[in-house]
Image (tube, rainbow, N blue to C red):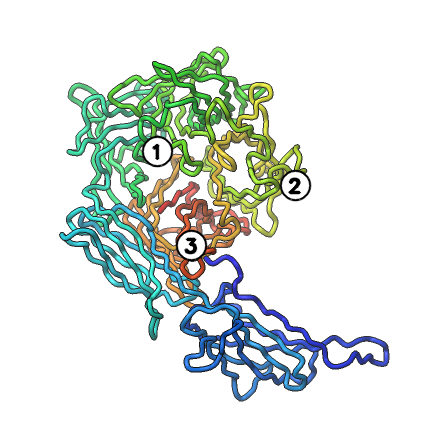
Amino acid sequence: MIKNCLFAVALLSLAFAGGCAKGGNGIVPPPTTINVTVPNDVPAGGLYPNQGPVTLTATVMNGGANTDVTWSLSGPTGTNCTGTPNPCGTLTPVTPATTPATATYTAPATPISGVAVTATLVANSSVTGTLGITVLQVSVVVTPLTVNVGESLTQQFTAVAVPDDAPQSFTWSVTCNSNQGCGSIAQAADVATYTAPSNTANVTVQAAWNPSPAPPSPAPAGQATATIVASRLPAGTYSFQFSGYDNSNNPVAAAGSFILASNGTIATGEGVEDVLSIVPPNTLPQPQQYPIASVSYTPIASGNGLGKLVVTLTTGPTTTITNTYTAVLTSSDTIRMIESDGLGTGSGVMQKSAAATVFNANPQIFVFGFAGVDSSLSRVGSVGLLPMTPNATGGTISGGAFDANDNGSVVCNPAPCSIAATSGYAQPNGNLPTYWNMTLITGNTTQHFDFFVAEGGTSSQTTPLTLYAISTDPIDATHPALSGTMVYQWPGTTSAPITYNNLAFCPTAKAACTSVSSLTGANANVSLTLGTTDGTSSGTGGTGGFTGTFDQNNDGAITSVGPAAPFSYTYVATPINTNEYLGRYSFQMLEKPNTTPAQPLPFVLYASGPNRGFLLDQSSSSVMTGTMSPQPSSIVDSYAFAELAGVFAAATISNSNSSVTPVVENLLLTSPGGTPPTFVVGGTLNPGSQALTGAYTLTLPGTGTITLTNPTLPAVPTSVIYAIDATTVANPGNPTIPNYVITDFMMMGTCTPQGAPATCSSGPPSSIIFAQQ
């Protein structure tokens, strides 16, 4: 978690033996030197207070039989390294002397930098070796940092002491602003279970570092904020989307929005759901729209992060349909859900909607990614760009474009397809400000969509305004069934859009911009890519470079391109409407099947901002679609294990095949300490409420593995991890080097760790799971 090497590794203080004598053959013998080292399991970041004894080794090179040394300890200028306790720590030579010579060092109780341990050769005092030591202020990170907790429900919190190998022992406490009670917290080492009171309150949960034999005074502490709420589904406006399959393995998609009153009711006209499903006796998905009669959320058992979501639709004067979902909730109340009513399988997401004034307040550009099926029930994908300008009745769409792949066939040749200036949008229901209609005209085809305003805004690239869209035309040869997401493009105004050339996609000249791409295709084909764009390889224009690693699970056949032999591909900005660079890029990604040597697949990307956007495979029948999301520039190549400790709500996204069973998980990732530190997976898996056990790894670029060891889970695979977003937490020990907490990551089932291709006879889940704090 501490990124810079504060603990200088093996600083050599070289000195020559007296004179420059030559042998009879004229060869100058190498000088005698001393290298002082610490064990490999001592982190390079530094020691923590009172750590030790740590064994130091002085290796004499080119000294012949003269290996005896004396040891000395010094501190920064003005520090007197004497007394009890010694402010520089305690250095004790090992007796009797060993070969090579060793000593033990125990860090002082207070942080210090600039300490030096020196080994001096007894046979020649001018020959020395010095090791610089930094003793770090321990900092404590508690996750989740902020969380809403339902009244009387339980919420787990994790604590991590940094450096990672510091003792992971804490004393937990809670304080609040309520005289009716703050709740209680069960003491544990690095995980505590908090039980909320039966009243609303603002609560601070604190973990104070408490190592043995005693912590420093004052003890370093970390804290989190819990807001106790009456319901994890409070009153407000929500939007949602869902995709999956019915019990006959036919595709289903849905999207909608509703306004939930404080008494838990939905008024007439304030809730609607669009559904694309097979309607007998038709054999194609047909659009249906239903009023939403009610929505309810009930916690499962006493847990704060798992519940049952029930949505009831009015289908006739006296008939209803009730859909039931098992749901996991993030700390900010985003709901990720899987169907659990026996009517089919699938997954979706529900979020609080942005304020009605955010959308349609001024000219905006949106990019989109849609997926679905054509009239033959073959997979279709579409990505594109929509400049939207409001007017009194809604708005117009002009200058837009899109690319589409229908079962391996390009829809427009030459691409992209142009969207006519007569396209537009309007709000059909004044009672539900998040519900809009959209008409897109391209060539001789007119397509209609509904879309619903979800989360986000227009002031931040990291939380862009998001809309859920679904097609509403009867399905035929020119009208596929589509659903997906529309995202505000940064800066997104039609009056002054960014010129999205190669360099704009990686906005710092010649700097590396790293992202994670998640792709889902037909026939259970999914992948994750960690890629770096370099602006323009030449620095002045032309084709940009795209390099990195990826893992792909094609219905159990695993391809891993790892760090030992990363891919080296290209990307390039391509114009829309003659010479307008509005955010369309051609990318090379993954690999074409059965090609030797391996060749990349062509993709198109529509950028929603620098280093992010929607992706579409342009040529294969898998029709891979998905998103590219940037890793934070502040910590690129600098993730660490302990950053992943936390409580995550995880769920399957974008089912790639009806054979895939969607899951939701309450993941509990912890770092209980040890030397070297251990990193543990816990939590529960649904359906089945099965306990999870295992371990996780993480490398500096943010990739790693989760390996489950449950004997009760059949054929449990290893999953790869691709970390995305992180947030900073204050580091009182060194404010210039903050701590980080990973807030979300992607997982994909594999059989073996990254870098070892294999075929999975057990068939790991060929799906993407998104985990979020």
Is residue 746 visible in the rendered image? The answer is yes
Q: Which residue is at 47% across, 50% downward?
A: 751
Give the amino acid type for the residue marked by disc 1 in the picture.
Glu
Q: Can you say whether 645 is above or below 262 in the image?
A: below
| Amino acid found under the numbered disc labelled 3 | Glu
User: Mark 2 against mark 3, which lies toward the viewer?
Assistant: 3
Q: Is residue 133 above or below residue 317?
A: below
| Element marked by disc 1 | loop
Residue annotated with mark 1: 455
Q: Are marks 2 and 3 in contact (CB under 8 Å)?
A: no
Where's residue 760, x and y in %?
48, 47
Name which quarter of the figure residue 222 lies in. Answer: bottom left
Task: For label 3, count other residues whose C-alpha is less than 10 Å away and answer few (under 14), some (14-19) or many (20+).
Answer: many
Circle on res. 373:
none
* First in residue order: circle 2 vs circle 3: 2
Q: Which of the marked residues, 3 or 1, is nearer the chain's N terminus?
A: 1
**What residue lies at 51% left-to-right and 42% top-to-bottom?**
515
Viewer-nearest residue: 1 or 684: 1
Three-letter amino acid code at the position of disc 2: Pro
Task: Kindly state the secondary structure of the residue where label 3 is placed.
Answer: helix
Quadrant position of the N terminus in the picture: bottom left
Looking at the rendered structure, the secondary structure element under dot 2 is loop
Q: Is residue 761 in view from this perspective? A: no
From the image, tell me which residue sits under label 3. 643
Q: CA distance from mark 1 to mark 2?
A: 44 Å
In the depicted view, which residue is nearer to us: 753 or 358?
A: 358
Q: Which residue is mark 2?
A: 597
